[in-house]
Image (tube, helix red, strand yellow):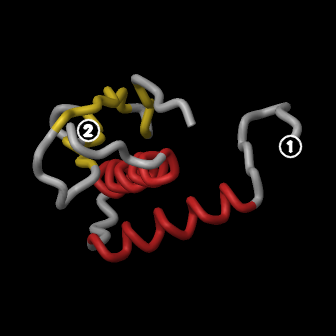
Amino acid sequence: MKIPERLDILGYEYQVLNEVTHNDSHYGHAKHKDAKIILYSSPDYTMPEQIEAETLLHEIIHSIDTALCLDLDENTVTRLSKGLFAVIRQNNLDFRKDTPNA
């Protein structure tokens, strides 16, 4: 998956950045006040594409949660991102208008 540089999330334009870190406890972070989604990478580790894509989806869900004041906890966001990612990937779903499903 090509990670976009920008995302429109419910009318907010988020910048998507990659940041090198030595802290491997988190794969990403959504900074709502700055309208940024940061995907972390390590100088010693290349994140597999599917983990990077699922992390982006996870951070998008956090951004939607904040914009809609849903008050989702981290476990719920993780379950939603993993579940949605699996369904989208396993069924090769493409939600763009007029794009045939491969």
Q: Residue at x 47, y 63 (%)?
A: 81
Q: Is residue 84 left or right of residue 41?
A: right
Mark 1 secondary-structure assignment: loop
Can you give x and y, in whole percent of width and height, for residue 87 in the image?
Answer: 66, 64
Q: Residues within 10 Å of mark 2 (few under 14, many from 20)?
A: many
The residue that mark 2 highlights is 38
State the mark number for residue 3: none
Q: Residue furthest left?
A: 22
From the viewer's side, name the closer residue of 75 and 8.
Answer: 75
Distance Cα–Cα, label 1 vs label 2? 30 Å
From the viewer's side, name the closer residue of 29 and 69.
Answer: 29
The residue that mark 1 highlights is 102
Q: From what the image shows, is residue 51 above or below residue 20?
A: below
Can you give x and y, in whole percent of width and height, for residue 73 in the image?
Answer: 27, 73
Q: Amino acid at mark 1?
A: Ala
Q: Residues within 10 Å of mark 1 (few under 14, many from 20)?
A: few
Query: Mark 2 and mark 1 in contact (Cβ < 8 Å)?
Result: no
Q: From what the image shows, is residue 20 above or below residue 68?
A: above
Q: Residue at x 36, y 27 (%)?
A: 13
Can you give x and y, in whole percent of width and height, for residue 2 in the image?
Answer: 53, 30
Q: Amino acid at mark 2?
A: Ile
Q: Is residue 8 left or right of residue 33?
A: right
Q: From what the image shows, is residue 8 above or below residue 52?
A: above
